[in-house]
């Protein structure tokens, strides 16, 4: 499972962030479904996105993020938010503490 978090960029309003995030979520689902994405959960605070992606294996996720579609997803997210966290998750959830800082 991957944990991802993004925060609205300084030049993005909260309203714009929410509109763009809705479109981004659809882009992620469409782009990665054929590459093996099994689940995608997004929490939105209004200015921060926290997402969980469930993949069958690390190898499949790695291959998916090397596909052309991944570049589109990454470029899209970078156009309206700053990446705060992108990491593989296990049973250790201590990474959540970094979001509160």
Image (spheres, rainbow, N blue to C red):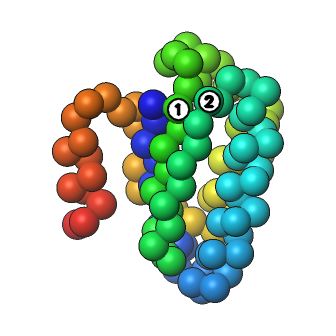
Q: Residue at x 21, y 55 (%)?
A: 97
Q: How many marks?
A: 2
Q: Is residue 26 above or below residue 56?
A: below
| Residue 73, position as x, y percentages in the image | 71, 47
Q: Label 2: how many residues lie within 10 Å, few (<14), some (14-19) or many (20+)?
A: some
Relative to residue 65, is residue 89 drawn left or right? Answer: left
Taking depth in this image into account, of 33 and 15 the one nearest to the observer is 33
Q: Is residue 58 above or below residue 81?
A: above
- Residue 62 visible? The answer is no
Q: Quadrant of the C terminus?
A: bottom left
Badge number at residue 28: none
Q: Is residue 86 above or below residue 19?
A: above
Pointer 2 and pointer 1: residues touching (CB < 8 Å)?
yes
Q: Residue at x 79, y 27 (%)?
A: 34
Q: Label 1: how many residues lie within 10 Å, few (<14), some (14-19) or many (20+)?
A: some
Q: Quadrant of residue 65?
A: top right
Q: Quadrant of the N terminus?
A: top left
Taking depth in this image into account, of 9 and 2 the one nearest to the observer is 2
Q: Residue at x 70, y 46 (%)?
A: 28
Q: CA distance from mark 2 to mark 1?
A: 5 Å
Give whichever of discs 2 and 1 has the lower sequence position: 2
Relative to residue 35, is residue 63 drawn left or right? Answer: left
Relative to residue 94, is residue 2 drawn left or right? Answer: right
Q: Which structural element holds mark 1?
A: strand
Q: Which structural element holds mark 2?
A: loop
Q: Which residue is mark 2?
A: 38
| Residue 53, position as x, y percentages in the image | 53, 38
Q: Which residue is mark 1?
A: 54
| Residue 76, position as x, y percentages in the image | 72, 56
| Residue 82, position as x, y percentages in the image | 51, 62
- Residue 41 visible? The answer is yes
Q: Residue at x 73, y 24 (%)?
A: 35
């Amino acid at each position: 499972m991957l944990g991802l978090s993004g925060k609205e960029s300084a030049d993005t309003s909260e309203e714009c962030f929410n509109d763009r995030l809705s479109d981004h979520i659809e882009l992620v689902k469409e782009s990665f479904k054929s590459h093996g994405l099994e689940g995608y959960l997004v929490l939105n605070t209004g200015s921060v996105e926290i997402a969980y992606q469930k993949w069958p294996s690390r190898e499949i996720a790695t291959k998916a993020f090397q596909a052309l579609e991944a570049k589109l997803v990454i470029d899209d997210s970078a156009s309206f938010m700053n990446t705060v966290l992108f990491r593989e998750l296990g049973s250790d959830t201590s990474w959540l503490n970094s979001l509160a800082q």
